[in-house]
Amino acid sequence: MQAAFTAEQEELRQSLRRYMAALMTPELKSELINTYGNEGGGPLFRQALRQMGSDGLIGLGWPVDLGGKGHGPIEQYIFIEEVTRAGFPFPYLTSESMGPAIAEFGSPEVRKDLLPKILGGEVVIAIGYTEPGAGTDLAALKTRAERQGDEYVINGAKVFTSLGHFADYIWLAVRTAHDAQHARHKGLSLILVPTNSPGFSHAPIYTVADGHTNQTFYDNVRVPARNLIGQENGGWAVITSQLNRERLTLMNPGIANLVYSQVLEYVHERHGGTRLIDQPWVQMNMARIYTALKTLNLACRKQAWGIAQGTLTAAEASAIKILGYETFLSVFRQMLEVLGPDATLRRGSPGVPLEGMLDVLYRTVPVYGFAGGTNEVMRDMVAQMGLGLPRVKRA
Amino acid sequence: MDFGLQETERELCELAESMLRDFSTPERLLKLEESGLRVDRELWAALKEAGITTIGVEPEHGGTGLGFGEACLVFEQVGKTVAAVPLLIHDIALQTLQRAGTLEALHRFVAADGWLAASARTDRGNSLCEANGRVTGTVSAVPYAPEAEAYLLPARADGSWSLYLVPAEQQSVRLEGQLGTDKSPMGRLTLDRAQASRLGDATLLEWLRQRLIAGCCAIQSGVVEETIKLTTAFVSEHEVFGVKEGSFQAVSQRMADTCIDSMTLQLMSRHVASLLAAQDDAVADVLAAKLLAGDVGHRVLASCQHVHGGIGHDRSYPLWRYAVAAKQIELAVTSSSEATAALGNVIAAQPDLVAL
């Protein structure tokens, strides 16, 4: 086994780190933090995203014939790690999940129109899957689309449509058939809905993590039929096609690595004449954090390598989601302990360590337990596909 | 970057596993355990014949010439089969002699039919001191000391630890047989001005210690993997309330966690094996791996024994051997908590030790 990156990959990492440091100007940081809850959507965010696109960074791992740089999944993983580390809210699902799905399933017109825009950092796509009555059990969704001539007419409502307040498109899962033959996931389709369509609207849901997600509403929204991705009633195949890649991207340890190095620096500095790292319990916490992060980093690298080899299984991809979430939960808690009562001061308070980043991170982590598939379902997949246990009965 | 096994590594694993499995049947292990010395001499002779007992020794010294990474893959198979052989201790002891350049002794023990025992402990269980080339004191729980040809032991001289080679056959060495929780033979050695040759200083001792720890992690990885395999088979067949036990979400969720634990332990264990194959010192990751191996062994065995119910305690069913093997390894060389404290010390001394 060999866990190290090649010299070229290390060089790529260093050049990305330099690039991102230059991209993250104080003005952009200020816009991200103050105006948009660090989710992006502002003019400087859009400008930076287009800059990344025109500098050829977004399509790093995409094939050359699609306009990408032709690097493999390991380089793409390094890219996500460095972008996350820099604190830029890169809309990675657009390029990592929906982009590849459009390349695979999209109509020629949509491919021709959208793929260059995705690679150019000109569009952001939000996922519209979850409904008030269909989250973990996605196949229960009720938003419907009806074919009328060369259009689909969409009616329904979605919830937790993150980025939906500024996205250019919603990657919408809808029901297109209602007979017994097309029950549950057999009657779903995937339609790309421009957010400037009449009848589309959204309302904010403010979150505990200082961010905001949305309810989105579809009231007789008319969309050209060419915006159907894949076959009518074939949406499930589109939705599941990118899940492995999506889960690995979601659990990228870039930000945790960054905070660990900052906490490490902090505990070695003298504060009031003493160093935190000289306390036995701080050493114990740091040792546990080191071990957990080392393990997660290795596991994520192995997955990126597995994607490159074409050997990654659904059980392994599910396992990384569970491992990532549990690791983030425990390491951020232990880091908060190390930094003490000041660690739970909110950003902007005088004396807050690490610019209040840990306070935001611990409030963000719970999302990882269910985003991209809830961990109970992930564990079912690990048990059934990884171990071969009998299927868990669902009503 | 390569997280897979090479073809030759796969073949080595298959060869070692099939030999170890053929001999380590429950009936045979029971007989050995009742004989008072849980060592399978026939299996040992077969492993020696196949070159597996000298895996880390260069061909010019009569060994197989494979690396530490390959040795650890074989240790995984020892864990999977809970085989009654001193392979880990003997093989790493030979590598230590090679490292120390003690070639006459190396050649002798490569050729011998028996095995070497070794300990790296420097805690209160070891009072050995050296003076004028003679070693005096007591060391406890030395794995496979009974009937070993010689021992590699740390002893203090002038306040610092060194590593010594102590021949077993001498009047001034007294061995009291001890029995490990996994029924493996161990020994308390009391030395009274015993003959010993110095192999190296504290650096060599640390070299040995890191390899013993990495080897333990590899064994634990195998123990855990096989335990999960056994348990998966059991809950897939065993019925409760008219359905298979493994179809209850409470059971399958718990088993999923054991699967993730096993994946991470194998990864960390192979990672440190690859580091030690390439460099002398990898202390931070070696300690991290042992911390994980102890925790994972504890968690996985607790879960697997639990979902078995009473059968997990029945000595006519194989699971119990894995439970005691996991605990033996968990406490061997250094425990999870001690490794955590030691790793904390390393981090305190190295402000630039980033996780990756």
Image (cartoon, grey):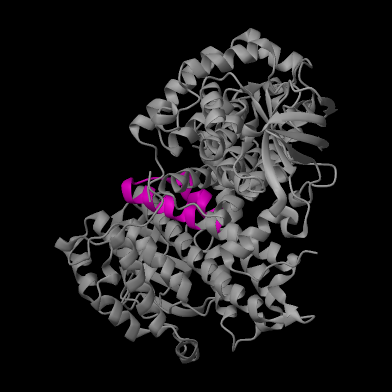
Residue A240's place in the image compared with A344, above or below, is below
Q: Residue A55 vs residue B323: left or right? A: left
- Of residues B332 and B199, the one nearer the viewer is B332
- Of residues B246 and A176, the one nearer the viewer is A176
Q: Residue at x 73, y 59 (%)?
A: A181
- Of residues B217 and A215, the one nearer the viewer is A215
Residue B175's place in the image compared with B152, above or below, is below
Residue A223's place in the image compared with A281, above or below, is above
Q: Would you say residue A124 is visible in this rendering?
A: yes
Q: Residue furthest left?
A: B60
Q: Is residue B267 magenta?
A: yes
Overall secondary structure of the magenta section: helix
* Magenta highlight range: B266-293
Q: State which quadrant residue B197 falls in.
A: bottom left
Q: Is residue B155 magenta?
A: no
Picture coordinates of residue B198 (x, y %)?
29, 58
Q: Would you say residue B117 is visible in this rendering?
A: no
Q: Residue furthest front?
A: A149
Q: Residue at x 46, y 16 (%)?
A: A55
Q: Residue B109 vs residue B124: left or right? A: left
Q: Residue B306 vs residue B321: left or right? A: right
- Of residues B40 and A49, the one nearer the viewer is A49
Q: Residue A148 vs residue A236: left or right? A: right
